[in-house]
Image: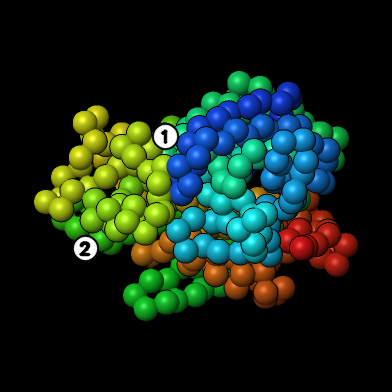
Amino acid sequence: MGLGIGLLGFQTTIAHSVTLSGTGVHSGAEVAITFHPAEADSGIVFQRVVGEQTISEFKAVSSQVGNTDLCTILGFSPATSIATIEHVMAAIYALGLDNLLVEVHGAEMPIMDGSSAPFIEAIEQTGIKALAVKRRYIRILKPVRIESGASWSEFTPYDGMRFEVEIDFDSPLIGRQAWKGDITPSVFKTELSRARTFGFMRDVERMWAAGRGLGSSLENSVVISDDNTVINMEGLRYKDEFVRHKTLDAVGDLALAGAPFIGCYRSYRGGHKMNANALKALMSDPTAYEIVETSTQRQRSVPREVIAVNAP
Ligand SMILES: [Zn+2]
């Protein structure tokens, strides 16, 4: 079974603090973030800091998500919210990190190269350590499905953490692509983590005109021209980089469950909004999942009323 990171189901954090900085893709501003170790049961917490002062703090769970139009945002007011958390969350979730404090000097995460790879590198550089408290998992017990037009996504029971993501773009360069696999730290790192954000030139131009995506560039996005070619000199990192990035996004969005899930997540033509809505649908049906302290079958369940994984 490929769950966790081989630490026998114990919670984890990082060994030491580590800092990264880069450009915010929406604001174009320079931002610095520091990952700090955190105690067991504290979860993944983001703090927005100005100077020495913490102006807001959010647990990275779906009830704290304000907007998912362009990226995933924690908080409900631009003055205090923290944007573009999905690629960081994907790295944290895939590496099996349960507890972390993310100190953010700015309004959003740095976009880095548009993938999760720089965050993986930073975390691996400091190292991951086990804590003395058992990890809890969300085990999917029955199918939960949502649909929106031609798009759909669903959770189904499965003995592992599996993603099956399919996209279908009205662009001959992208077209129909699918990625399927069980997520382990090494699978995520080699197959998904380097896949970059992508966009169409016409949309990038429209975004810039509206004063958004100001930090977006060929350094952090794959850009597709109007005649359906990749503008970036270096080309693609994977032949099907597009669906791999969409899978990376889905991993980051489902990280907002607040605990690793044991099940299969499938999506067709999805995105941040659909991932967020699927997670909401799952969480709102207490008969669809159970909280367990081990990733192996038929172990004692922890009563749900004792542990609210996704509590606000
Ligand atoms: Zn993304």
Of pointers 1 and 2, the one earlier in the residue sequence: 1
Q: Position of residue 253 (x, y in %)?
A: 55, 55
Q: In the rendered image of this protein, does residue 16 appear above or below residue 35?
A: above
At numbered mark 2, what does the secondary structure look like: helix, strand or loop? loop
Can you tell which mark lies on residue 113? Answer: 1
- Which residue has dot 2 on it? 170
Q: Residue at x 61, y 64 (%)?
A: 66
**Is any part of residue 94 visible from this angle?**
no
- Quarter of the image for the C terminus: give it: bottom right
Image depth: mark 1 or mark 2 in front: 1
Q: Residue at x 42, y 77 (%)?
A: 148
The answer to whether the residue labelled 1 contacts the one labelled 2, judged by CB atoms less than 8 Å apart, is no
Q: In the rendered image of this protein, does residue 228 appear above or below residue 105?
A: below
In this image, 62 relative to 274: left or right?
Answer: right
Q: Position of residue 224 (x, y in %)?
A: 22, 48
Q: Position of residue 74 (x, y in %)?
A: 63, 56
Q: Residues within 10 Å of mark 2 (few under 14, many from 20)?
A: few
Q: Residue at x 23, y 56 (%)?
A: 202
Residue found farthest to the left = 227
Q: Is mark 2 within 8 Å of ligand 1?
A: no
> Which residue is nearer to you in this view: 71 or 281?
71
In this image, 179 relative to 35: left or right?
Answer: left
Quadrant of the rendered image containing residue 171 = bottom left
In this image, 190 relative to 54: left or right?
Answer: left
Q: In the rendered image of this protein, does residue 297 appear above or below residue 17?
A: below
Residue kind at label 2, given as amino acid type: Asp
Q: In the rendered image of this protein, does residue 273 appear above or below residue 122?
A: below
Residue kind at label 1, given as amino acid type: Asp
